[in-house]
């Protein structure tokens, strides 16, 4: 296996770095299974989108500005996580912590906007129990939001490890896998605004 | 090592911004017929996913381990079969019910 893709300083092909390469592959396989899960939720949404049961449609419920703001927050956070990965490779611990903190705030802003949107819809009588369309919408977008929330907790835990343990091999290896997770969630969001929000508002 | 450096993230970010701004702007202004905007949304999404895979996840054909590429290909086939097959059946069913 080629070690160039890992953030792990794996020039010395030690036993430890090999274990972390295996973990990277294992995590990659998890991400692929997650991609299948999201693909099937997208498919369910595509089938259910017309089944509004006389209730509100996407055009009445979605806000283009809110979707654009969420997209911007997540895309910028993906880039700032990239800067954290670069700082980790340069061994700059305080820069890693700084970029992780910015990534966390951007991700938290995204989750805040999503929860506000969900609550607004539920208060307006457009909760997941209103129609097949809304069940599929809340399942798909909610699953993504849950992933982002778990990612936020993971960022907090890993920031603690970077602060306490420093940029050791296990910590940088975990940081690399968290990076895969975070960038992957941005890809899932590209699917969400392209399948849910933009066609819904067209 | 420089291959995955700062430039990679910045180029990826700029391309992603363009590929996001174009479909959002089209939906905001409705300057084209809806069916054509749908195609542009779909095209921009596919391109943006490729941009993310390449510039953020650093997937490519030289440094990415073979196992990872194999896993991506297998996932793509599974998604194509399951999503394509289900949509085929459900759209067909929908048309038959409408008659």
Image: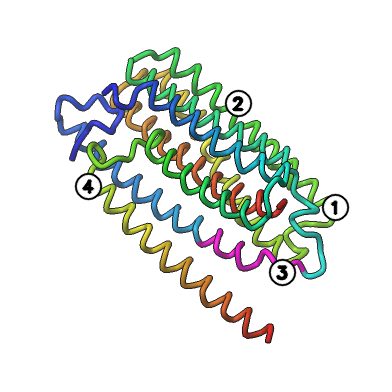
Location of residue B14 in the rendering, given as x and y in whole percent from the top left corner: 50, 28
Name the residue rendered at 34%, 46% in the picture: A28
Element class at badge 3: loop
- Of tags 3 and 2, the one toward the viewer is 3
The stretch in magenta equals A40-52
Picture disc at residue A105: 2
Kindly indicate whether the residue at mark 3 contacts the one at mark 4 (C-beta within 8 angstroms): no
User: Label 4 neighbourhood size at 10 Å, few (<14), some (14-19), many (20+)?
Assistant: few
Q: Are marks 4 and 2 on the same chain?
A: no
Residue beneath disc 1: A124
Kindly indicate whether the residue at mark 2 contacts the one at mark 4 (C-beta within 8 angstroms): no
Location of residue A116 in the rendering, given as x and y in whole percent from the top left corner: 75, 40
Q: Nearer the viewer, residue A16 or A48?
A: A48
Picture disc at residue A51: 3
Magenta stretch secondary structure, dominant: helix
**Of all residues shown, which one is farthest toward the right?**
A124
């Amino acid at each position: 296996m080629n070690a160039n893709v890992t953030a792990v300083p794996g020039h010395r092909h030690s036993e430890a770095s090999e274990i972390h390469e295996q973990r990277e592959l294992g995590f990659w396989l998890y991400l692929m299974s997650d991609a299948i899960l999201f693909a099937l939720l997208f498919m369910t949404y595509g089938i259910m989108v017309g089944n509004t049961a006389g209730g509100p449609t996407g055009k009445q419920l979605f806000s283009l500005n809110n979707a654009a703001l969420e997209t911007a927050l997540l895309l910028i956070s993906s880039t700032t996580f990239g800067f954290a990965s670069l700082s980790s490779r340069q061994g700059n611990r305080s820069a890693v912590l700084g970029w992780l903190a910015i990534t966390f705030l951007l991700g938290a802003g995204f989750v805040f906007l999503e929860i506000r949107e969900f609550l607004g819809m539920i208060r307006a009588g457009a909760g997941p129990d209103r129609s097949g369309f809304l069940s599929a919408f809340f399942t798909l977008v909610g699953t993504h939001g849950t992933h982002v929330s778990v990612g936020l907790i993971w960022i907090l835990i890993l920031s603690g490890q970077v602060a306490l343990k420093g940029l050791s091999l296990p910590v940088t290896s975990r940081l690399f896998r968290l990076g895969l997770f975070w960038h992957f969630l941005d890809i899932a969001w590209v699917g969400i605004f392209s399948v849910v929000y933009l066609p819904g508002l067209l | 090592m420089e291959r995955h450096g700062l430039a990679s993230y910045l180029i990826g970010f700029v391309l992603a911004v363009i590929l996001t701004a174009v479909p959002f702007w089209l939906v905001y202004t409705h300057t084209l017929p809806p069916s054509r905007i749908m195609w542009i949304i779909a095209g921009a999404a596919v391109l943006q996913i490729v941009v993310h895979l390449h510039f953020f996840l650093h997937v490519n054909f030289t440094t990415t381990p073979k196992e990872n590429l194999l896993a991506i290909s297998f996932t793509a086939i599974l998604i194509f079969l399951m999503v394509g097959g289900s949509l085929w059946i459900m759209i067909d069913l929908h048309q038959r019910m409408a008659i």
